[in-house]
Image (cartoon, grey):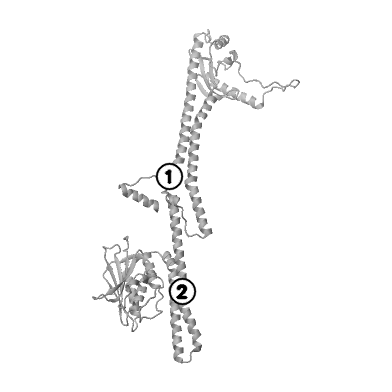
């Protein structure tokens, strides 16, 4: 493709291979994949970073509360609140005064439980701060007040919060410090630490500290995640825009151009701005333009072929019609026999013309259907010449075959190649004098780009120098005096060139000349590539 050619040129310029990322062989696909992966990496990286940050914040908060709880528990012992003889116990009154006189940071709550798990003191109960929310607007005068009973959902929420707190306190009474995240009575998430209060080794109660700023921390994390999400969204939008601008719109333009060719019966697609692109869209545009140009050329060739066929068929038909119109007017048997011979000659000419036209029209299909295989030219030419030798009639030119090539194999199709050599031999025999000779010779020269050369020579009058190339055109039937008219359709050599070109070879014509420069015959030379070797 064109992009592959451009890459090869770039490699040839600096001598180093150009390394480019390709996804499935596509540069554009790799670019789109990279954009989408980048957006996902940004999103995942932000999420992982925030998860680690959230975990670190919560662990740091729990550790801070644990340190505060240990300090407060030590203060309880130093103040004598946890002492007593002979059985140590908590002093509820002193604990309440202690909570009232000590500073509890805003947003935190301290509660003290005795060894039976009963609440002894609560910082919310002894503080001057009144927790809660603002009251709703007052009802209009004369409006009856609705009973303020908690809803079943609120009741269940309070019970669940008290149950979680009681379970945490019970575990702490077993002597192990507890740290957890749970919901309070208002449904807010809190970080809770419960620490056993000891006198020597005996557990006298539990000190619970709560921090209710978990939701604010999570909200801050969500706000911190927002830039990552926005960046990821922007990258995805950019990739979608790139897909639209560089893929969707060009494909739509190519589709519209193809529809225009179909609806307006145009012959070609031309989108110069797309053809200059160096990616797959440019390759597609160039391929479509090349395809439509090829189709246009083929359509022109078909039109010319149809016009030539019409012209060539009209000639024998006109002759036949004239002979038939003249036949009733003739009076002698000699004249009638002459007209009959003319009719038979035109019928044979028409039959041969139709046969060659049919063969020429099926040639492309046969070449595309038949799979190439190894063909030994020595064997193929030997079999063809043997057929001519076996059917030799008096007065016809003799066909001789000689070969100097031991290994002469080509990759091709045996039936079309056989038609090439039969057409050349038939053409040479038609120009050869009675009892003349047609020589077929196979040679090999590895110094040439096309090593195999097949020559077909005759002893006829030769070819006019100005017609050495036009003899390969369709319906070329210019013949020297003395040769049979109507024996050739003018398609044989055209078919020869078409088949040889399809096999990667070349064919040309030249005259054989004597020492004085006079033509002593014609020579057709076919050059073919050797199997396994590129021309």
Q: Nearer the viewer, mark 1 or mark 2?
A: 2
**Total numbered circles:** 2
Query: Residue 501 in the image: x percent, y percent?
Result: 37, 65
Please give left or right for residue 143 compared with residue 480 in the image: right
Q: Residue at x 50, y 29 (%)?
A: 224
Query: Residue 390 in the image: x percent, y percent?
Result: 34, 79
**94 vs 428, nearest the viewer:** 428
Please tell me the numbered disc located at residue 311.
2
**94 vs 482, nearest the viewer:** 482
Query: Residue 467 in the image: x percent, y percent?
Result: 35, 72
Residue furthest to the bottom in view is 332
Please give left or right for residue 197 compared with residue 369 in the image: right
**128 vs 436, nearest the viewer:** 436
Write down the quadrant of residue 530 in the picture. Answer: bottom left
Q: Give the structural element (helix, strand or loop) at label 1.
A: helix
Q: Is residue 6 visible?
A: yes
Query: Residue 241 in the image: x percent, y percent?
Result: 49, 42
Please determine whether, in this image, residue 51 is positioned above or below residue 364.
above
Q: Sequence-wise, which precedes: disc 1 or disc 2?
A: 1
Q: Estimate how packed mark 1 is, as few (under 14), some (14 to 19) or many (20 or more) residues with alpha carbons within 10 Å.
A: some
Please give left or right for residue 335 compared with residue 113 in the image: left
Q: Residue at x 39, y 44 (%)?
A: 21
The residue that label 1 is drawn on is 30
Please determine whether, in this image, residue 367 is positioned above or below residue 96.
below
Q: Give the structural element (helix, strand or loop) at label 2.
A: helix
Q: Quadrant of the C terminus?
A: bottom left
Q: Residue at x 46, y 64 (%)?
A: 299
Q: Estimate how packed mark 2 is, as few (under 14), some (14 to 19) or many (20 or more) residues with alpha carbons within 10 Å.
A: few
Please determine whether, in this image, residue 506 is positioned above or below residue 325.
above
Q: Quadrant of the N terminus?
A: bottom left
Task: Confirm or deny contact between disc 1 and disc 2 (CB under 8 A).
Answer: no
């Amino acid at each position: 493709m064109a992009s592959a050619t451009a890459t090869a040129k770039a490699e040839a310029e600096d001598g180093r291979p150009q390394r480019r990322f390709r996804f499935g062989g596509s540069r554009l696909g790799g670019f789109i994949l990279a954009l989408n992966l980048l957006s996902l990496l940004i999103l995942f990286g932000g999420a992982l970073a925030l998860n680690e940050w959230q975990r670190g914040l919560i662990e740091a908060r729990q550790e801070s509360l644990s340190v505060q709880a240990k300090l407060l528990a030590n203060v309880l012992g130093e103040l004598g609140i946890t002492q007593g003889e002979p059985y140590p116990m908590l002093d509820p009154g002193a604990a309440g005064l202690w909570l009232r006189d000590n500073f509890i940071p805003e947003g935190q709550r301290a509660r003290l439980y005795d060894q039976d798990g009963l609440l002894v003191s609560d910082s919310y109960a002894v503080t001057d701060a009144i927790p809660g929310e603002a009251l709703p607007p007052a009802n209009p005068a004369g409006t009856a007040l609705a009973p303020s009973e908690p809803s079943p959902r609120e009741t269940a929420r309070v019970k669940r919060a008290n149950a979680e707190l009681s379970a945490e306190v019970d575990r702490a009474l077993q002597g192990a410090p507890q740290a957890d995240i749970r919901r309070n009575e208002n449904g807010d998430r809190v970080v809770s630490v419960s620490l056993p209060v000891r006198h020597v080794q005996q557990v006298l109660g539990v000190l619970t500290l709560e921090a209710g700023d978990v939701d604010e921390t999570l909200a801050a994390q969500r706000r911190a995640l927002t830039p990552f999400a926005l960046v990821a969204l922007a990258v995805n939008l950019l990739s979608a825009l790139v897909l639209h601008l560089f893929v969707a719109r060009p494909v739509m333009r190519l589709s519209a151009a193809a529809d225009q060719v179909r609806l307006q019966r145009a012959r070609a697609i031309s989108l110069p701005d797309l053809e200059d692109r160096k990616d797959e869209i440019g390759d597609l545009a160039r391929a479509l333009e090349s395809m439509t140009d090829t189709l246009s050329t083929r359509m022109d060739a078909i039109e010319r072929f149809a016009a030539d066929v019409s012209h060539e068929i009209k000639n024998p038909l006109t002759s036949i019609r004239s002979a038939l119109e003249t036949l009733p007017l003739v009076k002698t048997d000699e004249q009638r026999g002459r007209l009959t011979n003319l009719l038979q000659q035109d019928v044979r000419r028409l039959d041969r013309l139709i046969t060659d036209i049919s063969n020429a029209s099926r040639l492309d299909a046969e070449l595309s259907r038949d799979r190439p295989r190894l063909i030994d030219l020595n064997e193929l030419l030997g079999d063809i010449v043997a057929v001519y030798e076996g059917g030799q009639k008096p007065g016809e030119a003799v066909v001789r075959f000689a070969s100097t090539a031991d290994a002469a194999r080509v990759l091709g199709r045996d039936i079309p190649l056989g038609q090439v050599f039969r057409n050349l031999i038939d053409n040479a025999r038609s120009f050869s004098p009675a009892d003349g000779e047609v020589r077929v010779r196979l040679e090999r020269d590895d110094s040439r780009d096309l090593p195999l050369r097949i020559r077909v020579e005759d002893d006829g009058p030769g070819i006019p120098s100005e017609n050495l190339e036009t003899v390969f055109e369709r319906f070329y039937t210019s013949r020297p005096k003395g040769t049979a008219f109507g024996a050739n359709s003018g398609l044989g050599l055209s078919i020869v060139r078409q088949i040889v070109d399809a096999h990667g070879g070349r064919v040309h014509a030249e005259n054989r000349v004597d020492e004085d420069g006079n033509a002593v015959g014609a020579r057709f030379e076919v050059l073919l590539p050797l199997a396994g070797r590129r021309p």
